[in-house]
Amino acid sequence: MADSMPVGGTVPAAGPPQHPADLVLRNAKIHTGDRARPEASALAVRDGRVLALGDEHAVAAHIGPDTRVVDALGRRVVPGLNDSHLHVIRGGLNYVLELRWDGVRSLRQGLAMLREQAARTPKGQWIRVVGGWTAEQFAERRLPTPAELNAVAPDTPVFVLHLYQSAVLNRAAVRAAGFTRDTPDPRGGQIVRGRDGEPNGVLLAAPGALVLYSTLAKAPALDEADRKTSTVHFLRELNRFGLTSAVDAAGGFQNFPDNYATVVELAREGRLTLRIAYHLFPQTAGQELDDLRRWVATVRPDEGDEWLRLNGAGENLTWAAADFENFSEPRPELEAGYEGRFEQAVRLLMEHGWGFRLHATYDETIRRDLAVFEKLAADGLFPAGNRWLFDHAETVSPHSLERIAALGGAISVQNRMSFQGSAFVDRYGAETAARTPPVTEMLALGLPVAAGTDATRVSSYNPWVALHWLVTGRTVGGRALYPPQRLLSREGALELYTRGGARITGEEEVKGLLKEGFLADFAVLSHDYFTVPAEDIPHIEAVLTVVGGRLVHAVAEYEGLDEAAAPPISPAWSPVARFGGYQASLPPSASSPPSASGARQADRVAEVAAGSDEQYRWRLACGLEPAGPAGFVDPCYGG
Ligand SMILES: [Zn+2]
């Protein structure tokens, strides 16, 4: 027990145990997720799995001379979180190149970060803010303007992606991207021009996001060594929130096998700190079947191990079947006849025993996809016991849900409405938004439902922001979207974030619960998820995250208990090296719930409100004294 910290008070049983535990966690409030035994206060781990679970007495018998005993200090412990739709591989390859506005509370702070970063960024490099935020989270409730980006970064290209709706570029980025008055608008997008006909720095998805991500792709990428370090840091950033697993949704510019090499190598070296189940996504419109034929001939679903495994194809199977989720634009009509190649793709997968995931935002798309599946089912091909699921399904209808259930499908939902809920309400009305997506209806039908974020380019990867949305139905700006009967209990929401993900990868017998024999994946939380005020759920972090019995993240009282430190971030000018990832408003070591520090929050909001130029003009326009004291609630916000 020499290794324990804080030292536990459990007395080992007389005589050494026959099978001593590697790790014992005691004095914990463990939510197991297992209905047969929902609560426990201690657990023992051996060889990466839960050896025993129960009270102190039950685990004491497993403590040997080399067992590390960790005192949870009465904290809440939950099964490790599993984000069922995270672009984790791509996120890792780019993480240290990005300046994250996730969790930033004011545009003023966001711009200050850019100004500081511009001074640190060498010539030839870009500053990129790539998703994870929305104007609603800012005190100013608006996007930056190109002029503001020019002011904070006169010479360094700055690219700010706002969801898959728009991007704001400074003058240097417009130049670096090569946009001139003569550049034609790309398919489905718009390069906005000023009165002089020159690109003014704004790019719009209208509704296709190609214009956004193809511009981002012009920025320099990391070299192989830095991609690896970047991935290591991104996985640790996810561990920081108690994530222990993710299901990768692949994506554009994520080629197989080239762009998977980094995680494959980390897995081979035993350096993954997050379990990843991945998917394969054809890259070239019109040539999707070539990719799929090659893959079914060379790799198999479930290939790999508990750390890294192939789960199937998707989230796109054919490009023409993808509907873009830009709620600030009208719903796109998919091209007539996309079903032809789409049917060939699904048939090929089914014939080879492959499952898949499929991006579909709108019921209009889902109905057309289902017609294809039902046709294949009539041929005896579907379902074939293969795991398959729809991703997103924001506006799926009750009838489509029944058809999905009849075909044995599942659904993976994400909190895109946390970030885009207001745009959705503005276009379709509050009544339609109130069932978008209809999570409670999915559950009532008995459909397997898994939760996640769709990070990193739209939503933030912080799972507690997603859990907050499921529990409160509120956007990151605080707008209520759903009536009480459409909200999930905290336990129900957590189940979608733990067991839900395990079900869609066929791993519900090894993870998602804390139970003897299951993988020892769990998180000790900074605040008790079950009792903290609902508005504080987004501020929860893990103080200790354990994956397969390995301590992969340890802060506060556990500082220094985790595995060897991650290698230093490279390049040294990386925004992450300076700012980290998600910008927490409180350190996780705070012993009281975040809401207890209301005075501190009020100070911050007042400071933000008082300082912005926008606020100055706004207050003038409201007829208020611009230099007057900025209260916690500004009357200008009320209207
Ligand atoms: Zn998608």
Image (spheres, rainbow, N blue to C red):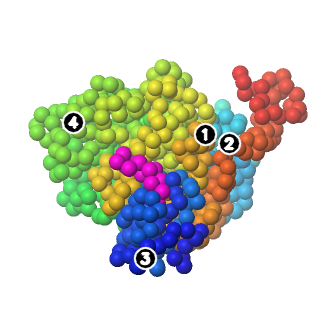
Q: Is mark 1 within 8 Å of ligand 1?
A: no
Q: CA distance from mark 1 to mark 3?
A: 44 Å
Q: Residues within 10 Å of mark 4 (few under 14, many from 20)?
A: some
Q: Which mark is residue 14?
A: 3
Q: Which residue is mark 2?
A: 595
Q: Which circle marks residue 533 in the picture?
A: 1
Decide: is 353 above or below 205: below
Q: Tell which circle, 3 or 4, labels the residue nearer the N-terminal end.
A: 3
- Label 4 or label 1, whichever comes before in sequence order: 4
Q: Position of residue 440 (x, y in %)?
A: 40, 31
Residue nearest the observer in this picture, 390 or 342: 390
The dot on residue 427 is none
77 versus 200 height, above or below: below
* In this picture, residue 441 sits left or right of residue 485: left
Residue at 15% across / 36% down in the picture?
Answer: 377
Specify the quadrant of the image occupied by residue 162.
top right
Q: Amino acid at mark 4?
A: Leu
